[in-house]
Image: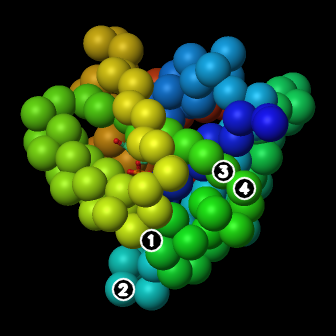
Amino acid sequence: MAKIALFPGSFDPITLGHQDIIERALPLFDEILIAIGENSDKTTLFDLDQRVAWITEAFAHEPKVRVVTYQGLTVTFAKANNSQFLLRGLRNPSDFEFEKSIAQANRQMESDLETVFLLTSARYAYISSSIVREVIRHGGDYTVFVPDSVRIA
Ligand code: ADP
């Protein structure tokens, strides 16, 4: 059976940290679905089409990666797409505490869906989409934090 991992997130925008997690997960899985969650009570800086386009371009060369969008529970979407694994990145202890609760709740709902965590590479551990958005809002050089596909007009 093909090993399919779902990497859920907002990706507002995708960063070098996300890209690093995806690239390092590629040898572990047959397919990685990068799943952008549409969350009604979360306002994003970039619209969904833009976020999809940036990720699609960043992984255009990688046949194992597919970009999808979803609403509702991540576990429901993962099961509907035959994913046996959820992929998440861990940067620091606060990510760990937060991710631990989510993973345990997800496991309670879908016991055969395993969450796999990769530790972020040290050089990207400080990068977050929220810091990148702040840099963008104030006209700073965001290009050092994101893949080349992220270009803001
Ligand atoms: P969410 O809205 O779920 O927090 P994000 O798009 O911010 O979504 O993050 C998606 C996943 O990527 C999470 O597992 C998060 O921990 C991970 N991640 C975010 N930034 C980095 C980074 N710099 N290095 C490694 N993983 C990261």
Marks 1/3: CA–CA distance: 26 Å
Vertical order, 100 against 142 (above or below)? below
**4 and 3 marks in contact (CB < 8 Å):** yes
Q: Residue furthest bottom?
A: 40
Q: Which residue is mark 1?
A: 44
**Does mark 3's beta carbon lie closer than 8 Å to ligand 1?**
no
Q: Is residue 31 left or right of residue 110?
A: right
The CA distance from mark 2 to mark 3 is 26 Å
Q: Residues within 10 Å of mark 1 (few under 14, many from 20)?
A: some
Depth order, front residue of 4/35 = 4
The amino acid on which the numbered mark 1 sits, given as a three-letter code, is Thr
Q: Which of the two marks, 2 or 3, is nearer to us in this view?
A: 3
The residue singled out by tag 3 in the image is 83
Label 1 residue near ligand 1, CB within 8 Å: no
Query: Which amino acid is tagged 3?
Result: Ser
Give ligand 1's quarter of the image.
Answer: top left
Q: Residues within 10 Å of mark 3 (few under 14, many from 20)?
A: many
Label 4: which secondary element: loop
* Label 4 Cα crowd, 10 Å radius (few <14 / some 14-19 / many 20+): some
Q: CA distance from mark 1 to mark 2?
A: 10 Å
Which quadrant would the C terminus be assigned to in this image? bottom right
Q: Which residue is mark 2?
A: 41
Describe the element under mark 1 as helix, strand or loop: loop
| Amino acid on which the number 2 mark rests in the picture | Asp
| Dots 1, 3 in contact, CB < 8 A | no
Mark 1 to mark 4 CA distance (whole Å) = 28 Å
| Label drawn at residue 82 | 4
In percent of width and height, residue 81 lies at: 73, 61
